[in-house]
Image (cartoon, rainbow, N blue to C red):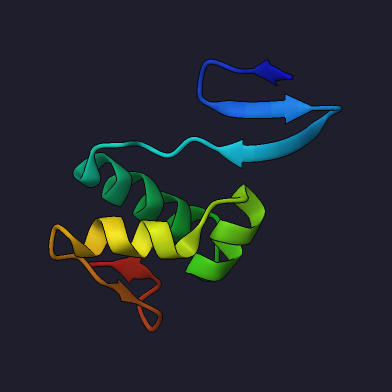
Amino acid sequence: MFTFAHGISFFNEKILAMKLPEEPMMLYSFINTKLRDFYPSLDAFCEDMNVDKCDIVKRLKAVGLEYSPERNRFW
């Protein structure tokens, strides 16, 4: 396994999982930027990045942020 500096791990050239920012506001900014620039939905982001949607929603809900499918962003 090889881990790049930005937290993506590769094993036999396959992405295992993306390491998301730990701090809630950094996570909020990171995900909203990705949703705005690259993904049509949170589901598409989670599937592509191989991350747990429930974990993201839970972590951001703990600081008062909720996902809006209509706006495709947390707010």
Q: Residue at x 40, y 57 (%)?
A: 55
Q: Specify whether 8 is left or right of 29.
A: right
Front-lying residue, 67 or 38? 67
Q: Which quarter of the figure is the C terminus placed in?
A: bottom left
- Counting every numbered tag in the picture gives 0
Q: Is residue 15 above or below residue 56?
A: above
Residue at the farthest bottom position: 70
Front-lying residue, 1 or 6? 1
Q: Specify whether 15 is left or right of 47.
A: right
Residue 34: x percent and y percent?
Answer: 46, 51
Q: Residue at x 43, y 65 (%)?
A: 54
Q: Residue at x 40, y 72 (%)?
A: 72
Question: In which image quadrant can residue 63 be found?
Answer: bottom left
Residue at the farthest right position: 12
Q: Which quarter of the figure is the N terminus placed in?
A: top right
Q: Residue at x 55, y 69 (%)?
A: 43
Question: In which image quadrant can residue 70 be found?
Answer: bottom left
Question: In which image quadrant can residue 68 be found?
Answer: bottom left
Q: Is residue 11 above or below residue 51?
A: above
Residue 20: x percent and y percent?
Answer: 43, 39
Residue at the farthest left position: 64
Q: Specify whether 2 is left or right of 14.
A: left
Residue 56: x percent and y percent?
Answer: 38, 57
Q: Is residue 9 above or below residue 29?
A: above
Residue 5: x percent and y percent?
Answer: 52, 15
